[in-house]
Image (cartoon, rainbow, N blue to C red):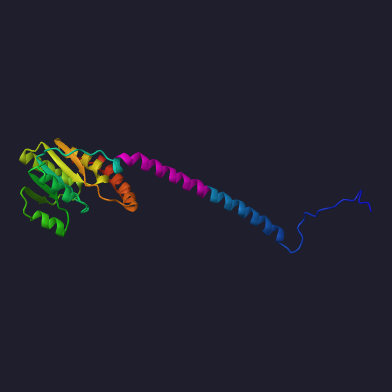
Amino acid sequence: MSFEGTRTTVNRSCTPPAGWCHSTETTGQQHIYDRRVRKRWVRGAAGVLVVLAVAVAALWPVYVRPRTDRPQPADAIVVLGGAHDGREELALRLARDGYAPQVVFSDPYEHSPLINRICHGGYSFRVSCFDPDPRTTRGEGRELAARAEAEGWHRVIVVTFTPHISRARYILGKCWSGEILLLDARPSIGIGRWAYQYLYQTAAYVEAAFENC
């Protein structure tokens, strides 16, 4: 049997049921649109991740590995306010080891049993506490400058925690021209808290850039 000369014709026109061709075309266009939207979201997410990675890397030496100092004999040890993360114990240990004749604690807390006990405890060295005004690093810097002028300080040891080191050095340096040695209590910090500190410290840095002491 020979099929030579025969031709198969494909009907490309719409046939019943009515609207079937239109629905198929619309569905295809929707799939194309969805794919484009997904690609845009993927590209956007990738861009955000790249920006975050660059920010983390750029600020790593500022917050995660800041420059700290070796303890040296000083006129006083100043403990900045914040979490009770070992900074109080470090300051007291330094005083016991003879690095300074007095320890000054920032006490912006409403009710802190630890600070209350320290401020009223008996030590072989002088311990005093103050409520900074305002209750910020700037307020602590003002108190440092006032006490340094009143008591003739030339060098102080300042104790805080890792992500605050660089900003504390910057702000306290605006308030007082004496020598400031920054020591890190080195507390354990989780990923969530690191993320918060990156945001908080950066915002506070920007604010400090536009403020005097």
Image position, residue 130 (x, y; %): 11, 51
Which residue occupies 15% across, 57% down? 114
Residue 80 position, x and y percent, is 18, 48
| Magenta region, residue range | 40-61
Q: Please state the total of marks drawn on the protein image.
A: 0
Pick whichever, 140 or 210, lies toward us.
140
Magenta-span inclusion, residue 96 = no
Q: Where's the C terminus, which quadrant?
A: top left
Q: Quadrant of residue 210?
A: top left
User: Which residue is most to the front?
Assistant: 97
Query: Is residue 96 found left or right of 170 in the rendered image?
Result: left
- Above or below, 109 relative to 170: below
Q: Can residue 134 be seen here? A: no
Residue found farthest to the right: 1
- Where is residue 120, by image quadrant? bottom left
What type of secondary structure mainly makes up the magenta span? helix
Percent position of residue 183, x then y: 20, 42
Relative to 95, 68 lies left or right = right
The residue at the point 20 percent across, 48 percent down is: 136
| Whether residue 47 is situated above or below residue 85 in the rendered picture | above
Residue 35 position, x and y percent, is: 58, 51
Relative to 198, is 15 on the left or the right? right
